[in-house]
Image (cartoon, grey):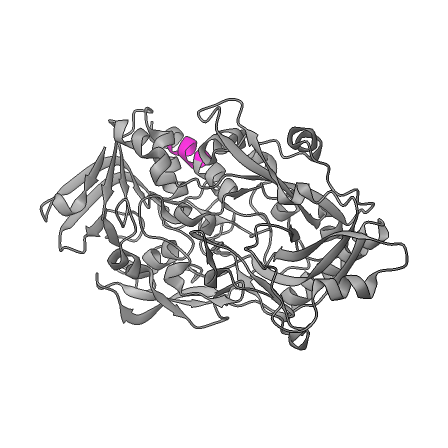
């Protein structure tokens, strides 16, 4: 059932077994996984069914650290996440891939690393997560997907670089996709336009209620036996820090770790690949496949390849993960555009040897893992929003070592492509630019790429963010190292759990949504075991 909280009277109280805060990928998954279990659920969503600028403004804040950019365009914090039904899945690009085993391991060369468990802990939940995100299943093996796609991968002869498989599900807006399920669920009530402004507690050990307000002035309370905070990597930390009934430092923040270790995937455009006549590039463009079974049987989704550092290379070279996309298509007419300087055609001619032909040219886009830094964090500023809550300040930090590792990874990939006889790569960090936010083509924002050799800078090349907000309530066995335990329960509270990528203990390099949905499935099973 869906209810508009603006239609309720101030002073209304709702009571449930479980109160889930945030109706994005994690919150909707938890609510629907609990449906039919015998537990009643109230699911609270800040916005309505569609984006509303007044509610979206509640996500506004200030970047006080590294600049917030995507591609080459600056972005405001309120553009990186969405406050309406379905949350940030409303602009999710749909890339799905699980974390790699090395992401779960303690790596001695990193200041902070390691999950409380290995990837095998999540294996039982990956198939159910695959259904929620609308992909074919939890098998991402290259041997499975080459015949399924009917496309070969690059025949790399390397122990350092491997081909990853991505399943793509776009658009998969959880609000639209699962509204009918939530409407039909007698044991789940979704309150729209219901903004949680305080996690009320009288002793700092248990949440007594959540205080909810609408922009129209309605004030209600929700009480439950268990609470799940699932509002995203920035808002989870914000609400915990803003809930100061007992401690001015916020709820569950006795060790001053809430909001710390903010991590992103570092978005880096670093060069061109010039590949020979039979480069197997169609696999990097991708194709459609049909889901054969499950709740979305008969639907189609995409699949494509990407390159990345192997786990063995990451371990043996004391480095961090890197994934590289080859961007070869979907440009508007007249693109790729080279406003200044050298073009890929120029580079092709420069590198061509007698008798050689290059069959394709691709830009290289990388997502690099960021080393966790406790000084990279979500804070509260002094400015307030329309509900009186302090707005966010994001002090995002990454290091020169992060940049160096990303560029080193690119070099490893370039060497592997060359050594395998597939073509050549020219790295031009800082000399490749993409401006997707400025190019609206047939109703869709499309990247236009340009090159500028004068901007090449191996020390200070541009780094963007992937809108992947992670690790601000990181999972740990020791409360001195994180905010939630291995079950995603707050270390310092008895009835508050956290969902979403804020609980990631490390970010890895795979996009986070598939893994955070698997964690949400796991959390729902845990709550059933605890509460029933």
Query: Is 353 placed above or below 493 here?
Result: below
Q: Position of residue 157 (x, y in %)?
A: 83, 45
Q: If the image is split into quadrants, where does the C terminus sit?
A: top left
Q: Residue furthest front?
A: 333
Using the rendered view, name the quadrant where residue 181 is placed.
top left
Query: Is 242 placed above or below 487 here?
Result: below
Q: Residue at x 85, y 50 (%)?
A: 421
Q: Residue furthest bottom?
A: 454
Query: Is 407 placed above or below 303 here?
Result: below
Q: Is residue 524 magenta?
A: yes
Q: Is residue 95 magenta?
A: no
Q: Residue at x 51, y 55 (%)?
A: 446
| Camera sees residue 291 | yes
Relative depth, front residue between 307 and 119: 307
Is residue 128 rendered to the left or right of residue 211? right
Q: What are the residue bounds of the magenta stretch?
A: 521-527
């Amino acid at each position: 059932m869906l209810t508009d909280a603006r239609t309720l009277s101030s002073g209304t109280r709702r009571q449930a077994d479980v109160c889930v805060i945030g109706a994005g990928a994690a919150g909707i998954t938890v609510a629907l996984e609990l449906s039919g279990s015998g537990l009643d659920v109230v699911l609270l969503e800040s916005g309505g069914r569609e984006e509303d600028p007044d509610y979206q403004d509640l996500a506004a804040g200030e970047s006080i650290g590294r600049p917030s950019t995507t591609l080459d365009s600056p972005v405001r914090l309120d553009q990186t996440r969405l406050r309406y039904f379905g949350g940030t899945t409303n602009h999710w690009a749909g890339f799905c891939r699980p974390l790699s085993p090395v992401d779960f391991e303690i790596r001695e060369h990193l200041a902070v690393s390691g999950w409380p468990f290995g990837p095998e802990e999540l294996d039982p939940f990956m198939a159910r997560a695959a259904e929620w995100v609308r992909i074919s299943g939890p098998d991402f093996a290259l041997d499975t997907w080459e015949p399924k796609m009917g496309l070969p991968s690059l025949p790399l002869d390397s122990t350092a670089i491997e081909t990853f498989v991505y399943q793509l599900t776009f658009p998969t807006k959880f609000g639209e996709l699962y509204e009918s399920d939530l409407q039909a669920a007698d044991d789940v009530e979704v309150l729209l336009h219901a903004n949680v402004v305080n996690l009320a507690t009288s002793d700092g050990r248990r949440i007594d209620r959540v205080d909810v307000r609408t922009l129209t002035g309605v004030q209600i309370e929700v009480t439950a036996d268990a609470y799940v905070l699932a509002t995203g990597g920035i808002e989870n930390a914000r609400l915990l820090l803003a809930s100061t009934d007992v401690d001015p430092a916020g709820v569950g923040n006795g060790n001053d770790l809430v909001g710390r270790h903010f991590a992103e995937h570092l978005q880096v455009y670093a060069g061109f690949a010039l590949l020979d006549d039979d480069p197997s590039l169609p696999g990097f463009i991708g194709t459609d496949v049909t889901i054969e079974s499950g709740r979305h049987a008969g639907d189609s989704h995409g699949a494509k390849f990407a390159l990345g550092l192997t786990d063995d290379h990451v371990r043996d070279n004391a480095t961090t993960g890197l994934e590289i996309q080859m961007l070869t298509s979907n440009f508007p007419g007249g693109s790729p555009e080279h406003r200044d300087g050298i073009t890929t055609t120029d580079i092709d001619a420069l590198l061509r040897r007698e008798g050689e032909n290059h069959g394709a040219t691709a830009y290289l886009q990388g997502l690099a893992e960021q080393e966790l830094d406790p000084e990279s964090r979500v804070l509260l500023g002094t400015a307030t929003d329309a509900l009186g809550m302090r707005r966010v300040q994001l002090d995002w930090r990454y290091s020169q070592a992060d940049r160096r590792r990303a560029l080193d990874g690119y070099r490893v990939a370039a060497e592997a492509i060359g050594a395998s006889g597939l073509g050549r790569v020219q790295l031009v960090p800082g000399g490749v630019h993409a401006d997707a936010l400025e190019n609206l083509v047939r109703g869709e924002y499309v990247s236009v790429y340009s090159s500028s050799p004068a901007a090449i800078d191996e020390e200070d090349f541009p780094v963007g963010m992937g809108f992947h907000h992670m690790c601000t309530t990181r999972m740990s066995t020791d409360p001195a190292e994180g905010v939630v335990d291995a079950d995603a329960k707050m270390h310092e509270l008895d009835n508050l759990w956290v969902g979403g990528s804020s609980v990631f203990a490390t970010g890895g390099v795979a996009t986070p949504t598939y893994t955070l949905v698997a964690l949400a499935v796991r959390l729902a099973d845990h709550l059933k075991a605890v509460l029933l």
